[in-house]
Image (spheres, rainbow, N blue to C red):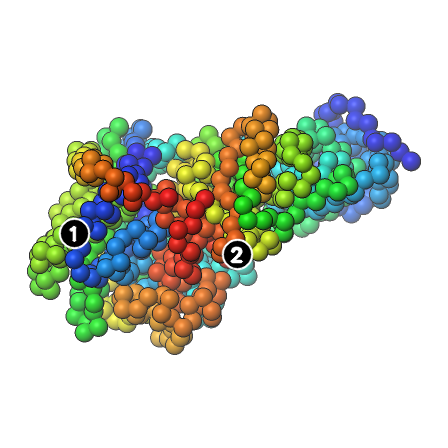
Amino acid sequence: MKYVDEFRDPRLARSLVDDIAKRVTRPWVLMEICGGQTHTLVRYGFDELLPKQIELVHGPGCPVCVTPLEIVDKAISLASRRDVIFVSYGDMLRVPGSTTDLFRVKAAGGDIRVVYTPVEAVKIAQANPARSVVFFGVGFETTAPAHAMAILQAKRLGVTNFYLLASHVLVPPAIETLLESAKNRVQGFIAPGHVCTVVGFQQYEELAGRYHVPIVVGGFEPTDLLEAIRELVIQLEDGRAEVVNQYARSVSRTGNLAAQHAVEQVFEICDRRWRGIGPIPQSGMRIRPEFAQFDAERVFGLEGSGAEEPSECIAADVLMGIRKPMDCPAFGRQCTPESPLGAPMVSSEGACAAYYRYRRHGVEAGMKG
Amino acid sequence: MCLAVPGKILTIDDAAGLRQARVQFGGITRVASLELVPEAEVGDYVLVHVGFAISRIDEKEAMQTLADLETMARLADELGPEEAGQEGQ
Amino acid sequence: MAKRPEFDGVLTCPMPVGVHDRIVLGHGSGGKLSAELIEQIFLPAFNNSALNQLNDQAIVDFPGKQLAFTTDSFVVKPLFFPGGDIGSLAVHGTVNDLAMGGAQPLYMSAAFILEEGLEIETLRRVVQSLQRAAIEAGVTIVTGDTKVVEKGHGDGLFINTTGIGTVQRGLTLSADQAVPGDRVILSGPLGDHGIAILAQREGLEFETTIQSDSAPLHTLARAMLDAAPVGAIRCMRDPTRGGLSSTANEIAAKSRVGITLEESCIAVREEVRGACELLGLDPMYVANEGKLVAIVDPCVAGAVLAAMQQHVYGREARIIGTVTESNPGTVVMRTAFGTTRIVDMLPGDQLPRIC
């Protein structure tokens, strides 16, 4: 596949790894923010490739993981209604709510449908005028434009039975919260390349300057991440703290203005709870009053539950890179993908699930075919 | 987050005032909205996320990135046995 | 005692059943309507002397061998998909379950659960496809059943089968027989069936020319067994639901060994890869209906592989890995980068993701 395979070339990856190894003179703690990047790192076994002085910690870039428990509960309550067709991305189906999850609701007879794009949800609404179609719109800045477009399309087509249950989170406030924390150990960041495709990387320049941390906008293929890591190491060894765009084939400094415009039309920034972390000011996006007719929370009058996560789940620390999944006493025991305690174990992008699926125990080194 | 895949625009259709394309991803084809990347044209590669193109792949930048990597790899090859010995088995 | 039933090779297209073009509850009640359905849809399609007697069971001949016996149910949706349908799938799935034990498949039963309102023409198409697949596989449908459920309770059409075949004495293929050093052979590219089905699924549709790989594998299995001494092939499995990952994990667990797979040796068609990339799926977990995995003594792996590559369903066969002593019960994938990761079983179905 073009623009995919070339960036997975083992030979190119190997030379990047060797170069990084030559440059590293002391330990560095680096964080990749996006769950998709975590997926690549773990899938390709990067911790086996990189020099031991480089410690990779995984950031809170998993919108599935950080969707607040009360929103999951609201989703479940909507999906359980007979007059609702609940439409969602596949990612959210197994995320545990306070007592159950969407998958179980589906098994019990809830009309829950998995789609690839929110456009399908609007179509389902058109095809089922007698029922309410609620789309579970979870995502970062990358996905918000699609959700905005779905609402704009529904409005233009005069569809009156389409609703969005919105759960949007923004990356920079989360990074800032981490950088403000006394427990922070992260010295360099790989910024999420697809988020930046939409919003550009201007916001990160301010963070890099204020906190004196290098930030590299990274893509998702193995060589993208290795290039980003290499650039961070170069800067850290040199004492610099700049923003560099590794993912230039997709990202520009100002981003995608059409996408940003769509988002500004439909959504406004608000405070937002992050599951496992807590409230982060100005870190979410809700539907503007002008589009209230499409807002599932408003229309269905949903009360918050204020639910608490199980105390054994250390998602907060894992999501902020302070602890690793393996540090969690419940990891692989009470908390497994079959019976997750927290969202990072359910979402395939969650750090816990990634570690569990791909590398649960140390695999014997030097295995030969 | 953000599974987005590069695909090639095969055809574009402006029916009902909505700009859409048939995009090819390694052998399968799917419809994607071009509303967020309206300047994209047939033959362009776009990055598609949840059914929407979110950027046009900048071919020059892609080639430049690969060229830089290739240069590094060739230098590593030239350095000889010390590097070659590290080739993973 | 009836001899092995003869099939006269003619698929007739009977006249429509009475004045019904849809299944009604009466078709499942055992009365006149049921009889009409059997006479007009099932008998003309399966037509053989055992079935035609319409007893509650079929008495058939067995040369003195070990009996292989399996049961399976088919609930695929949509009923018709590129490369097959629930009827042909029912035959292939049942035959393959027998074939993985080294059996020669001989007879099948086919029980249909029909939803009230199903178009009879749909049933006819499925039954005729089932028979075509049975002819190709050399099996006879000797007994069956029909039930009808109320509208809204049945998803159109389900098929339950049992299959019977014979296995030569002394031949044991079993998942607990893998030993360190054995080679893992895969008969062809992964994921065709699962992706062909997914391409039709509402909400996820995409255009593709990918067809299901649904196929009967018993002659391939035979060719493999003929190419090796008894015992050299430890086990054969078809990676259906759960994909290659489930199959490999089952073998590793039952045999208490590790299995290391080489990612660069596992073939995936371009289209399957495109679909998987787009939907965030891993081909290791996607269903196949015309592939097998074999665990083989390293001394005969080459010969078995050669025999496979001569067969229409094994042309793209490759050695994809090795059984190891280390990491028992675990399947490890070595990537093109030389690194490793664990290939775990999924708790449930793989779901498309956007993250």
Residue placed most toward the observer, C205 or A129: C205
**Label 2 secondary element:** loop
Residue placed most toward the observer, A184 or B50: A184
State the residue position of label 2.
Answer: C328
Residue B61 vs A101, above or below: the answer is above
Q: Are marks 1 and 2 in contact (CB under 8 Å)?
A: no
Residue placed most toward the observer, A340 or C252: C252
Q: Position of residue A334 (x, y in %)?
A: 47, 70
Residue occupying the point 40% across, 67% down = A342
**Label 1 secondary element:** helix
Q: Position of residue C64 (x, y in %)?
A: 84, 38
Residue placed most toward the observer, C251 or C54: C251
Residue A313 vs C165, above or below: the answer is below
Please indicate whether residue A155 sits to the left or right of residue A92 in the image.
left
Whether residue C58 is visible to the viewer of this picture, yes or no, is yes
Q: Amino acid at mark 1?
A: Arg
Q: What number is the disc on residue C70? A: none
Instruction: Tell me which chain the residue with mark 2 is part of.
Output: C
Residue occupying the point 30% across, 65% down = A319
Residue A115 vs C88, above or below: the answer is below
Q: Amino acid at mark 2?
A: Pro
State the residue position of label 1.
Answer: A23
**Outermost front residue:** B81
